[in-house]
Amino acid sequence: MRDGEIRREWRARAATAAELLRTKYHPERIAITGDLLSPQPLGFWSELTLAVRGLSGQDTLHVYEDLSAMDVALVEADGTYFQQNLEDI
């Protein structure tokens, strides 16, 4: 099934993005969130999303640029809203 292949590719891309973030920006926490955690099949509007906590304010724009180039969405997870339903990578 194609959904399984896409999920494996997205997890690999998430791991690559997380390694870039750890090396370059040193956030406190990085987690997968959103569509990849849903049991529903991925669709046209699905996106790979990482929640990141502890970014420096001056780095945020660069993080968005780096992740956008990898086709990864970013959610700043410094608030309590994103403390549920996160999967650390």
Image (spheres, rainbow, N blue to C red):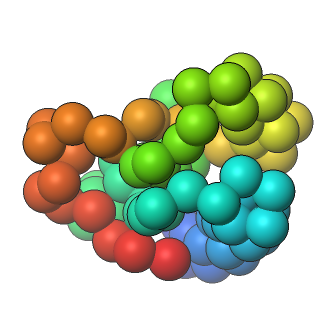
Residue 77 lies, with reference to residue 30, above or below; the image says: above
Indicate left or right for 23 with 82 as reference: right
Q: Quadrant of residue 39?
A: bottom left
Residue 13 lies, with reference to residue 48, above or below; the image says: below
Q: Position of residue 29 (x, y in %)?
A: 44, 63
Q: Residue at x 70, y 32 (%)?
A: 59
Q: Quadrant of residue 19?
A: bottom right
Indicate left or right for 3 with 84 as reference: right
Q: Is residue 80 visible to us here? A: yes
Instruction: Decide which of 57, 67 is in the foreground and name it.
Output: 57
Q: Residue at x 42, y 35 (%)?
A: 76
Indicate left or right for 68 with 2 as reference: right
Q: Position of residue 62 (x, y in %)?
A: 79, 29
Q: Residue at x 61, y 72 (%)?
A: 11
Q: Quadrant of residue 13?
A: bottom right
Q: Is residue 36 visible to us here? A: no
The N terminus lies in quadrant: bottom right
Instruction: Decide which of 52, 45 is in the foreground and name it.
Output: 52
Q: Position of residue 44 (x, y in %)?
A: 55, 34
Q: Position of residue 68 (x, y in %)?
A: 76, 32
Instruction: Decide which of 50, 35 is in the foreground and name it.
Output: 50
Instruction: Decide which of 79, 51 is in the foreground and name it.
Output: 79
Q: Residue at x 82, y 39 (%)?
A: 66
Circle count: 0
Residue 4 lies, with reference to residue 41, above or below; the image says: below
Indicate left or right for 87 with 85 as reference: right
